């Protein structure tokens, strides 16, 4: 397990963020559409985005183990998104995969290409399993998770903060160590309104 080791895919470089990325990242964080299914409010100014880096991203790079990436396009060197693993449990060797992509770059296979590369790295680093959640309405994100080999496990309702809205989340999981009987039950146990959907 490492702290955001550099990863390369066919089209992208996954690397740590720095202050030179503020303008590119701001294009993503200020977009209401991109942030529909993300937990935080949009950034209204470049200073908001700088604070996002200082408060949420840079502290990750001080940890022993963390994975928080800028997705840099090899052809343009533009940051077109971000990807991360949060809620890392070093004892269970697991974490929660997430990503956000600039709207101009949707439907180009970026999220799945990057996620597959990250899952490969996480497996090499000794992670046992990875989980991910998406809003029930975010069909595209669910398809990305399935393309990456993640399996739907269950759904649950959460009063999502800080937006304070009721969201039905679908929880997906991939067992990197081959233990297919394992199911991450934290959300199932935490939220009373949980259930298993059919035909996902």
Image (spheres, helix red, strand yellow):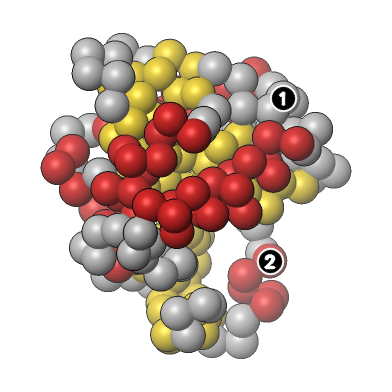
Camera-side residue: 132 or 48? Answer: 48
Q: Secondary structure at mark 2?
A: helix
Which residue has dot 2 on it? Answer: 186
Is residue 119 visible in the rendered image? The answer is no
Q: Residue at x 45, y 79 (%)?
A: 163
Whichever of callouts 2 and 1 sits on the residue coming sooner in the sequence is 1
Name above or below for residue 195 compared with residue 70: below
Residue 60 sits in which quadrant?
top right
Q: Residues within 10 Å of mark 1 (few under 14, many from 20)?
A: few
Mark whose residue sits in front, 2 or 1: 1
The label on residue 82 is none
Q: Is residue 168 left or right of residue 4?
A: left
Q: Is residue 36 left or right of residue 171?
A: left
CB contact under 8 Å: marks 2 and 1: no
Q: Residue at x 62, y 73 (%)?
A: 188
Q: Residue at x 18, y 38 (%)?
A: 105
- Count of numbered circles on the image: 2
Name above or below for residue 100 compared with residue 16: below
Q: Secondary structure at mark 1?
A: loop
Q: Position of residue 23 (x, y in %)?
A: 33, 40
Q: Which image quarter holds the C terminus?
A: bottom left
Q: Position of residue 124 (x, y in %)?
A: 64, 18
Q: Position of residue 189 (x, y in %)?
A: 69, 75
Which residue has dot 1 on it? Answer: 2
Name above or below for residue 45 compared with residue 36: above
Camera-side residue: 177 or 191? Answer: 191
């Amino acid at each position: 397990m490492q702290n955001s080791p550099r990863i390369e895919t066919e089209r992208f470089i996954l690397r740590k963020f720095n202050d030179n990325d503020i303008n590119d990242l701001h294009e993503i964080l200020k977009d209401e559409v991109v942030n529909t299914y993300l937990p935080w409010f949009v950034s209204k100014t470049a200073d908001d985005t700088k604070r996002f880096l200082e408060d949420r991203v840079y502290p990750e790079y001080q940890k022993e183990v963390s994975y928080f990436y800028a997705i840099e396009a090899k052809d343009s060197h533009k940051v077109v998104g971000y990807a991360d693993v949060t809620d890392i449990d070093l004892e269970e060797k697991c974490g929660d995969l997430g990503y956000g992509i600039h709207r101009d770059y949707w439907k180009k296979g970026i999220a799945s290409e990057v996620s597959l590369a990250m899952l490969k790295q996480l497996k090499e680093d000794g992670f046992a399993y990875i989980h991910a959640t998406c809003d029930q309405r975010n069909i595209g994100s669910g398809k990305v998770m399935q393309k990456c080999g993640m399996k739907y496990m269950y759904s649950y309702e959460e009063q999502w903060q800080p937006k304070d809205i009721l969201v039905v989340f679908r929880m997906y999981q991939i067992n990197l160590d081959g233990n297919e009987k394992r199911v991450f039950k934290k959300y199932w146990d935490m939220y009373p309104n949980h259930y298993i959907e059919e035909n996902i």
